[in-house]
Image (cartoon, rainbow, N blue to C red):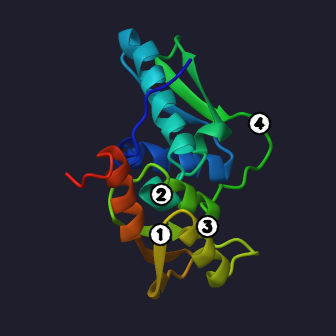
Amino acid sequence: MGYHTRPEMIEENLDLLSAIRQAVEKGEILRLDVEPDRLSSEQYSIRRILKATEIHRTAYGGEFCDLGKMVRVEIDPGRAQLVIRLKAPGSRYRISRVNENDAINSLTNYQGSMNVLEFYPSEEFTEESFEAALAEVGWILYRTSKTKAPDGKVSYAVEREEGERSAAFDLLNDGHGY
């Protein structure tokens, strides 16, 4: 079954996603009380939100990256509850972290000309290779904008190269510039 998702779905459901992540980190089962006649629709809604964490890995700074891959959402009709549990009981999942490759991939469908990329650098990360990879896809890295959080997450400002954008508009307009 396919799910239509948007990155905003993650920010709109922070409380739910935080509760699910905490349960995953502790290896616990999360039970949500639901009106009996809404069990199926709420299950679908939560599955859709969790799918958004897989598709939009960098949304909300990547805080919930791939959370949907770790859990199952089941119905307990006797108690009118949704049960969210680890897919592999007893195993300890490591919460995924958005890396520099995810950050670059997030620019693929980005429509704006400026953005701030947030990610956890991989062990292989160097600013030089990151800058070169961004240049290959038409973006300029502003190294001086770098900020680093205590947990290791970094952020950089990036800007689309003007030549890339105007060339794209020229193609759309057969080079006439209007």
Tell me: residue 124, above or below residue 62: below
Distance between the alpha carbons at the discs numbered 1 and 3: 14 Å
Name the residue located 49 percent from the left edge and 65 percent from the top edge: 138
The amino acid pointed to by label 1 is Trp
Looking at the rendered structure, the secondary structure element under dot 2 is loop
Q: Position of residue 88 (x, y in %)?
A: 77, 35
Q: Amino acid at mark 2?
A: Leu
Q: Residue at x 64, y 43 (%)?
A: 28
Whichever of labels 2 and 1 marks the residue nearer the N terminus, that label is: 2
- Work out whether residue 173 or residue 95 is closer to the camera in this orientation and state it: 173
Disc 1 crowd rating (10 Å Cα; few below 14, some 14-19, many 20+) is many
Q: Are marks 2 and 1 in contact (CB under 8 Å)?
A: yes
Instruction: Identify the residue shown where x is 42% and y is 26%.
Output: 45
Q: Looking at the image, is 130 positioned above or below residue 128?
A: above
- For disc 3, the marked residue is 100
Q: Quadrant of the N terminus?
A: top right
In the image, which is nearer the foreground, mark 1 or mark 3?
1
As measured in the structure, the alpha-carbon distance from the residue carrying label 4 to the one carrying label 3 is 31 Å
Frontmost of labels 2 and 3 is 2
| Callout 4: SS | loop
What residue did someone put label 2 on? 107
How far apart marks 2 and 3 lie (CA) works out to 11 Å
Q: Tell me the mark number nearer the camera, choosing from 2 and 1.
A: 1
Name the element at disc 3: helix
Q: Which mark is residue 139?
A: 1
